[in-house]
Image (cartoon, rainbow, N blue to C red):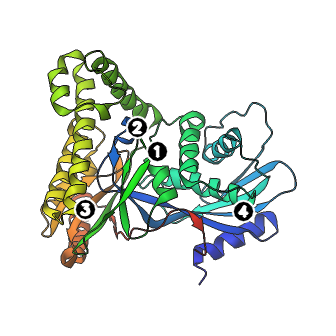
């Protein structure tokens, strides 16, 4: 059955470009635990949402790429053979950057008309930007007749965001949008880009609570934290052999050499080193069916993101505080880049509905804002719309 979003996207494509498109979709993501560690070569535990960015596409005979975003209500065109492409500083850079870096990786792309839309909220910490990149990249490769290596596509999309958009993100968001497995989270090693499935106990549910706050995580704020991590690595590598990322540092080593770096840099490193350890322990807890242990580690993750990494905000902290007072909760934490968006909550399955209702009521009473509450079903990675 064709969904409403597919019908609307096809109609918009026909209106703009007067022909029939092919449809592809790439999901957003949740991350159970492991925040701000992917660019430190750490371990993360994401899963794909059943919310996506959709791409409608048809090839052109020339080397032009015309892109329309229904959300932005704008068409942007550019030449794939532009010898010196420069960012526009807007949404189109995410697509153009992917096309540029696919070509630099040796893929021969055809010109195309492309319309993008989705049911994935922007700025909610669900990685709409990565889904935007991956849906466009997969669509461009497919209509160009190229064979798609999903891990390679994830790396190219990350490279485009780092070097063309200017956001120095890690690879987690692009990887899970490309490689997710329906019904499971993945424990992803961000150094080797290998992963294994982590089953979510059927007695638990993953509930997202959207604060509706959209305090933008700017490139500068994000990149500054990454630079602090690099400063910590530079300091520690003079004391410890073989350190190329914070992934290589134990908590005991970090504490021993804390005086080798400024206080702020130490706190950033303390979050990362602790979060990598928490993620591995949470995976082991889920393997053993220990939901209490996993939830406790999620709670510690939020506290560290709030206090050491300083990427939370009043709305996120309030949502977590409320969740910790609701029966049935195992653990709650902020999720995503920070400064707004969603919390993720591990909840007893039998109490998930009452939990969601209670959270909506408490948050609305405190803020006057009605939050979006979603119980997550882990979905598959990028692919054709009819998959």
User: Which of the two labelled residues, at mark 4 and mark 2, occupies the earlier sequence position?
Assistant: 2
Decide: marks 1, 4 in contact (CB < 8 A)?
A: no
In the rendered image, the residue lying farthest to the bottom is 1
Between 252 and 322, the one lying in front of the other is 252
The disc at residue 345 is 3
Decide: marks 2, 1 in contact (CB < 8 A)?
A: yes
The answer to whether residue 9 is above or below residue 254 is below
Which residue is found at the position 28% from the left and 37% from the top?
272
Q: Which residue is mark 1?
A: 171
Measuring from the top left, give residue 178's x and y in whole percent.
Answer: 52, 57
The answer to whether residue 77 is above or below residue 245 is below
In the figure, residue 182 lies in which quadrant?
bottom left
Query: What is the CA distance from the residue labelled 3 to the residue labelled 2?
Result: 24 Å
The disc at residue 57 is 4
Structural crowding at the residue carrying mark 3, measured as other residues with C-alpha within 10 Å and reported as few (<14), some (14–19) or many (≥20): many
Query: What is the CA distance from the residue labelled 3 to the residue labelled 1?
Result: 23 Å
User: Which of the two labelled residues, at mark 3 and mark 2, occupies the earlier sequence position?
Assistant: 2
In the figure, residue 293 lies in which quadrant?
bottom left
Which residue is found at the position 19% from the left and 20% from the top?
257
User: Which of the two labelled residues, at mark 2 and mark 1, occupies the earlier sequence position?
Assistant: 2
Q: Which residue is mark 2?
A: 39
Which residue is found at the position 87% from the left and 56% from the top?
61
Measuring from the top left, give residue 24's x and y in whole percent.
Answer: 62, 66
Measuring from the top left, give residue 387's x and y in whole percent.
Answer: 57, 74
Query: What is the CA distance from the residue labelled 4 to the residue labelled 2?
Result: 32 Å
Between 188 and 82, the one lying in front of the other is 188
Decide: marks 3, 2 in contact (CB < 8 A)?
A: no
């Amino acid at each position: 059955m064709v969904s409403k979003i597919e019908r609307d996207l096809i109609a918009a494509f026909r209106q703009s470009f007067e022909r029939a498109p092919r449809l592809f979709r790439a999901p957003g993501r949740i991350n159970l635990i492991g925040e701000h560690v992917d660019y430190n070569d750490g371990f993360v535990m994401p899963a794909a949402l059943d919310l996506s960015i959709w791409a409608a596409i048809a090839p052109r005979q020339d080397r032009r790429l015309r892109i329309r975003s229904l959300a932005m209500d704008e068409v942007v065109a550019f030449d794939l053979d532009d010898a010196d492409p420069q960012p526009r500083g807007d949404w189109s850079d995410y697509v153009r950057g992917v096309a540029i870096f696919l070509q630099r990786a040796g893929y021969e792309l055809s010109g195309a008309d492309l319309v993008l839309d989705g049911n994935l909220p922007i700025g909610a910490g669900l990685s709409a930007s990565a889904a935007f990149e991956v849906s466009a990249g997969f669509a461009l490769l497919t209509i160009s007749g190229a064979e798609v290596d999903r891990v390679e596509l994830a790396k190219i999309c990350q490279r485009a965001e780092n070097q063309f958009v200017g956001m120095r993100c890690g690879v987690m968001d692009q990887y899970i949008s490309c490689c997710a497995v329906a019904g499971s989270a993945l424990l992803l090693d961000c150094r080797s880009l290998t992963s294994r499935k982590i089953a979510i106990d059927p007695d638990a549910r993953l509930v997202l609570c959207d604060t509706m706050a959209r305090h933008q995580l700017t490139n500068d704020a994000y990149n500054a934290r990454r630079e602090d991590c690099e400063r910590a690595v530079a300091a520690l590598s003079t004391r410890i052999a073989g350190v190329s990322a914070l992934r290589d540092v134990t908590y005991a080593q970090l504490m021993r050499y804390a005086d080798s770096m400024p206080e702020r840099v130490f706190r950033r490193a303390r979050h990362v080193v602790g979060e990598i350890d928490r993620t591995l322990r949470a995976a082991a807890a889920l393997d053993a069916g220990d939901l209490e242990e996993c939830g406790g580690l999620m709670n510690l993750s939020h506290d560290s993101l709030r206090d050491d990494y300083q990427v939370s905000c009043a709305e996120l902290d309030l949502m977590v505080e409320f969740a910790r007072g609701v029966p049935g909760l195992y653990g709650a934490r902020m999720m995503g880049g920070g400064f707004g968006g969603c919390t993720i909550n591990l909840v007893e399955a039998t109490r998930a509905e009452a939990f969601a209702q209670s959270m909506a009521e408490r948050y609305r009473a405190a803020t006057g804002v009605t939050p979006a509450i979603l119980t997550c079903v882990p979905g598959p990675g990028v692919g054709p719309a009819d998959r």
